[in-house]
Image (cartoon, rainbow, N blue to C red):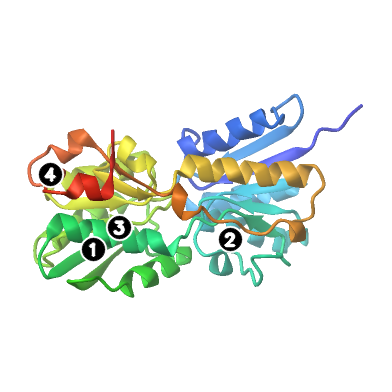
């Protein structure tokens, strides 16, 4: 009797997450179908970090062949579980922060650890986000807020890149709005952050760093609502964010990132060792500027009619 390989899926978010479903669909396209050519053991933590660790330990106990851990919290939970169990199971990362922080990687070209996959940090992304916002706001000073999960260390490089960006013709002032990994308070903290940013802090715009916590449906909706209520233009990092109701986004498709992660799982299941699978990043050509027309039409958020704006940035309108 043939023993099917087992793929562990460890997600910090929900089962309905579109990016997770893109990963599963890509596996199927590569010939890996649950119950037919492989066994998929999927665990969804719904933003609960303690639950995530318990789920990681359960996957490790099942002796899966590979673990797909799409975010920094999931990667760290999987590594902790493997260390506690004394096992060495390959981990594939997808939408994650700096793998040198998230996974302790020393060599991204020839991984020496048990982790490889896709890292979605592209320095030009943060720089271009700020240039777009500078053209929207105008003037000699751009005051930007950054909303992020303060308990996710994988986002530090993105934050540093943003803070160190130099704009042509304008002074940049960046203010941080970290929220804690606390499901009970995150929605109210998001609302408070937007109120402070628009009010006493005088921010012109808010940039949201992608994270499983901030991507939870209720939290993501609160972010969109807060941006509308405060009339604070909000920029997201995944192109799909604007399709899902956000005002605008500049970055790669996270569906595409997770599809590339599935390619890594495929190669590992076919016997390719981790050291022969260098970490990859989306290229500049994969970044896109997307604007939600319905949101852009709301009071205080419009910008597409600014002279020369659309011809310069060529946004995709959804």
Q: Residues within 10 Å of mark 2 (few under 14, many from 20)?
A: some
Q: Secondary structure at mark 4?
A: loop
Q: In screen coordinates, is 137 left or right of 53? A: left
Q: Nearer the viewer, residue 152 or 93?
A: 93
Mark 3 / mark 4, whichever is N-terminal: 3
Which residue is denoted by mark 3 in the rendering?
A: 129
Label 2, label 1: how many angstroms apart (C-alpha)? 27 Å
Q: Position of residue 313 (x, y in %)?
A: 27, 49
Q: Nearer the viewer, residue 143 or 284?
A: 284
Which residue is denoted by mark 2 in the rendering?
A: 76
Q: Secondary structure at mark 3?
A: helix
Whether residue 318 is situated above or below residue 73 in the rendered picture: above
Q: Secondary structure at mark 2?
A: helix
Q: In screen coordinates, is 86 left or right of 168? A: right
Report the mark closest to the observer, 2 or 1. Answer: 1
Q: Residues within 10 Å of mark 4 (few under 14, many from 20)?
A: some
Q: Which mark is residue 145?
A: 1
Q: Which mark is residue 232?
A: none
- The reply to whether discs 4 and 1 touch (Cβ–Cβ < 8 Å) is no
Mark 3 / mark 2, whichever is N-terminal: 2
Q: Position of residue 261 (x, y in %)?
A: 61, 46
Which residue is denoted by mark 4 in the rendering?
A: 302
Label 3, label 1: how many angstroms apart (C-alpha)? 12 Å
Query: Can residue 62 be seen here?
Result: no
Report the mark closest to the observer, 3 or 2. Answer: 3
Label 4, label 2: how many angstroms apart (C-alpha)? 40 Å
Mark 4 / mark 2, whichever is N-terminal: 2
């Amino acid at each position: 009797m043939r023993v099917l390989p087992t793929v562990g899926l460890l997600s910090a978010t929900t089962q309905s997450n579109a990016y997770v479903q893109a990963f599963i669909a890509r596996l199927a396209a590569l010939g890996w179908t649950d119950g037919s050519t492989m066994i998929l053991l999927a665990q969804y933590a719904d933003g609960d970090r303690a639950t995530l660790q318990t789920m990681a330990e359960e996957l490790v106990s099942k002796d899966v062949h590979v673990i797909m851990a799409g975010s920094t919290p999931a990667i760290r939970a999987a590594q902790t579980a493997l260390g506690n169990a004394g096992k060495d199971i390959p981990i594939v990362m997808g939408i994650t922060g700096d793998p040198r922080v998230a996974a302790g990687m020393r060599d991204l070209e020839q991984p020496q650890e048990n982790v490889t996959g896709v890292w979605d940090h592209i320095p030009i992304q943060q720089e271009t986000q700020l240039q777009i916002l500078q053209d929207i706001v105008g003037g000699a000073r751009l005051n930007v807020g950054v909303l992020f999960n303060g308990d996710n260390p994988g986002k530090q490089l993105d934050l540093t890149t943003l803070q160190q960006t130099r704009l042509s013709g304008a002074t940049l002032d960046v203010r941080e709005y970290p929220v804690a990994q606390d499901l009970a308070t995150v929605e109210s903290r998001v609302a408070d952050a937007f109120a402070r940013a628009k009010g006493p802090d005088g921010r012109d715009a808010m940039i949201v760093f992608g994270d499983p916590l901030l991507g939870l449906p209720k939290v993501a909706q609160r972010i969109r609502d807060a941006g509308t209520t405060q009339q604070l233009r909000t920029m997201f990092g995944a192109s799909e964010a604007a399709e899902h109701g956000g005002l605008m986004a500049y970055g790669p498709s996270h569906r595409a990132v997770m599809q590339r992660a599935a390619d890594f799982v495929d190669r590992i299941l076919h016997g390719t060792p981790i050291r022969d699978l260098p970490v990859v990043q989306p290229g500049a050509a994969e970044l896109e500027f997307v604007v939600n027309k319905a949101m852009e039409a709301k009071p205080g958020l419009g910008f597409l009619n600014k002279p020369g704006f659309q011809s310069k940035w060529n946004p995709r309108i959804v």
